[in-house]
Image (tube, rainbow, N blue to C red):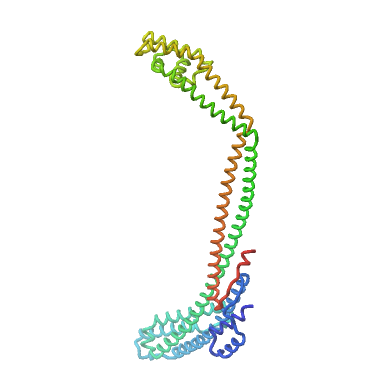
Amino acid sequence: MYICDLLLHYYMVFGWNKKKQVVEERIEESKIPTHKNTNLENIPDIIKDVTNLRQKTLIVEVKSFQKRIESDRKTLLSIADQLRKDNLNTGEMDPHLVLLVNRGKKEVISSIQNEFQIKFSDIDSFDRVLDFQRNASRGIKKVGDMLGKHSRVIHIFAKKYAKKLKDDLQELTNNLAEVNTLISNYDSNQELLGSVKSALTDFADAKRDIAKQHRRKSQLEELLEDEKQNEINLGNEIDEMKSSSEYKEFEDIQNKIVSVSEEEKLIKKKIEEQFIKISRPLNKYVYVSSLDKPLKIMTEALASSPYDVLSTTNEVGINTILNSVRSGIESGAVSVKDIEKSKQSVNEIQNLIPHLIIQKSEFVKKFSKLNNSLNIFDNDKLIKLVSNLEKSKFNISDTESKISLIQKQVESTRNQIHDIISKLELNLKQASSIYYKISYENDLQN
């Protein structure tokens, strides 16, 4: 559907002189447009039509130069035949020189006849154009090389043929150069069409990328909706748990535990204030003690953290330690500044031990009872729900970021497509001499 328009357009731009008037009339009648709208689906047909047009045009134009080269070929053969018949006055030459002249003459004539004796094949296809170019190039080169080899002989002893041979070979070379230029222009045109094909492939790749990006975006948007619903469900479940009477009671118990914990600090402080009175002898007794290992360990603990050691279970061991410390003070094994004062401090603490243990035990019972009361509410479940809610919020934010990134990738790919189409339009214009405005948005929606 494009070949006729392209052909007429080509005539308009590059038309042959002998058909100029006729072509101009046809162009005026047809009003061939220089701008056309098309779509990507039609591009392969346009490429095919442009290629066919260029090949047909190339065949016609090379044919015209083939006629000239054919004429030059006959002229060259005629000159060679004249040279063959001319003895070049060799009868007056030195015998050695005669051999040299005859050999040069024979090789030049033989080269011309071998390369140009047969008429060039008619050009009726693109492949024949290339065959003609190869054969003509090879023939001209071989004859030229042979003339160069015997240049001195021809110029000196066949002077009247030298210029004829040179001029005719030059004419052959010039005409072949025109043929080479035509083929080179055709090759350049094919390179442009190759770029168009490459752009079509790039477009297809970019189109697939956008399709993948849209699919991924749709998947993420579905995940985002599910995650937002999950966030709402978790929030509702957390609110429901926190609005229950069990949760209110749980909070009250927690507040009581905080209050009781303050009470523990007071008891601990009181015990430590009592034991600090005997800290010096107690610490020294650690190093001189002959007690069993368990009691020695208890002595070290009693010196560093008496609150942790005080218990009904340890009461006997604590009394044993205190009795041993007092005995050490009395015997001088434990060195102190004031023996009586230190013994009195040990006695006072030893008398307080039952009371201190009771205080601590009552606190531990109270704390344990409160702590057990926390079971009224499933706080672990609440903690897990809150943790899941935070994860859900993170997932929502992360998914939104991914969607935003994909959207940017889509926009970037669309910009690439715009550049691809612009390049495609430019190359197609240079290849066909017609500006095609390509519509491609529908292709991206398929």
What residue is shown at x 50% (from left), y 83% (from top)?
A: 116
What residue is shown at x 58% (from left), y 50% (from top)?
A: 399
As drawn, 391 above or below 267? below
Side of 71 where 247 appears, left or right: right
Side of 104 where 432 appears, left or right: right
Residue 326 percent across, percent down from the top left: 42, 10
As drawn, 338 above or below 369? above
Is residue 114 visible to the viewer in this orientation of the structure?
A: no
The answer to which of 265 and 80 lies nearer the viewer is 265
Residue 110 percent across, percent down from the top left: 46, 83
Q: In the rendered image, which quarter is residue 321 located in?
A: top left
Q: Which quadrant is home to the N terminus?
A: bottom right
Residue 381 percent across, percent down from the top left: 62, 36
What residue is shown at x 58% (from left), y 47% (from top)?
A: 395
Residue 367 percent across, percent down from the top left: 56, 24
As drawn, 288 above or below 431? above
